[in-house]
Every structure is written in structure tokens, then in C-alpha cells.
Image (cartoon, rainbow, N blue to C red):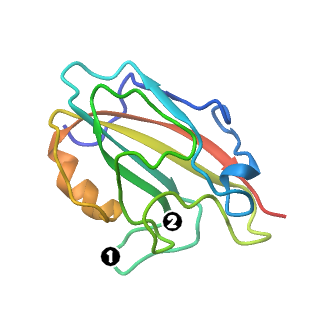
Amino acid sequence: MGFALSDMVVTSGAFGAHGAIPAKHTGEGKDVSPALAWSNAPDGTRAFAVICHDPDAPLVTPRGDYGFVHWVLYNIPGSVNALAEGTTDFTAGKNDFGNTGYGGPMPPEGHGLHHYYFWVLALDRDVKLEPGLTMAELLARIEPHIIGMNRLVGTYQRG
């Protein structure tokens, strides 16, 4: 299917679309993942994956990746339509801090407003993957099975 937006709707009780992410969910606060919910998944969805990516981060890797990955979470069953705040459920991948699990926004001071894309990807197979995959590794493994995706964008800026 390739990468294309679907009719899924992604929301959070912590912030609205293009709204400010509360400090609680950042590296300056408790650094806990925000609650997320989604609806209108495509028919045939068997699993989900979640990625949080900051394309505004001034980083490019030798592989050609850009931005900064804050969260990679997968092996989420198709029956799930929400993640609780601070969840440790499901399988955590590696973020660009070098850790597994969620690492909240922490842009360089004075770098301005950053946008954080919380992507939810719907898969047509329950692909059981090992812990610790990077975003690029995850996408390489699940791309043939993505049948829908959408995102919630939040913002954050340090002083």
C-alpha cells in the first residue's frame, strides 16, 4: 500500500491537534508518554504500531534519516484502540536517545517551536517483532503490511 494517510483519527487527552504538549510529557518534566487513542481503523486491521518523530530536529544521519525519533512501540493487538499515559505495555523499540521506550520532547534551547508527529500505523498482520527495533528497522519490517495510518501533531518549545 505504501505510506498514505487513512481515515483513522488519532487523539490525546493531553493536547489537541497542533496544540502544546504539556511539560509533563517532555524531558523537562516527568517524561511520560501522553495517552493516545485512535478510531476508524481500516477493516482487516490485525495490529498497530506507534511512532513519535520530530522532523524539526536539525539532524541528518548517514542513512539519510532526518529529525529525531522519540518513541517506537509495536506488537499492539488490533483490538486495542488506546494507550494509557506512561504505558509500558507492548513492545518498545529504540529511540534516538539510545533508550527503549518513550523519550519526550527536549529540543535545543532557543531552537524554536518543534512539531511532534505521533503516528499510528494499522497493519493487516499481527507481525511479532523482537524488542529494540529502531524506527527505520520497524518500518522496513512492517511496510508491506501497513493498510492505514494517521497522526496527531503536538508542539513544544524550550525557552
Q: Residue at 18% of width from left, 22% of height from top?
A: 44
Q: Which labelled disc corresponds to residue 157?
A: none
So how many labels did they put on this image?
Answer: 2
Amino acid of disc 2: Phe
Q: Which residue is mark 1?
A: 63
Q: Quadrant of residue 21?
A: top right
Q: Badge 1 local density, few (<14 within 10 Å), some, or many (20+)? A: few
Of labels 2 and 1, the one closer to you: 2
Which quadrant of the view contains residue 121?
A: top left
Circle 1 — which element? Answer: loop
Question: What distance separates the C-alpha of mark 2 from that of mark 1?
Answer: 13 Å
Residue furthest to the right in view is 159
Residue 131 place in picture, x, y as percent: 28, 61
Q: Earlier in the sequence, mark 2 or mark 1?
A: 1
Q: Nearer the viewer, residue 106 or 86?
A: 86
Q: Quadrant of the C terminus?
A: bottom right
> Amino acid type of disc 1?
Arg
Assess disc 2: are there few (<14), some (14-19) or many (≥20) residues with their C-alpha within 10 Å of its C-alpha: many
Which one is in front, 131 or 10?
131
The residue pinned by badge 2 equals 68
Identified at 27% across, 57% down, the residue is 138
Q: Residue at x 37, y 33 (%)?
A: 5
Residue 129, image x and y in percent? Answer: 20, 54
Rendered location of residue 40, percent (x, y): 38, 18
* Residue 18, x across and y down, in percent: 66, 38
Residue at left offset 40%, top offset 26%: 81
Quadrant of the snapshot with the N terminus: top left
Judged from this view, the residue extending furthest toward the bottom is 62
Whether 137 is drawn above or below 40: the answer is below
Above or below for 117 versus 72: above
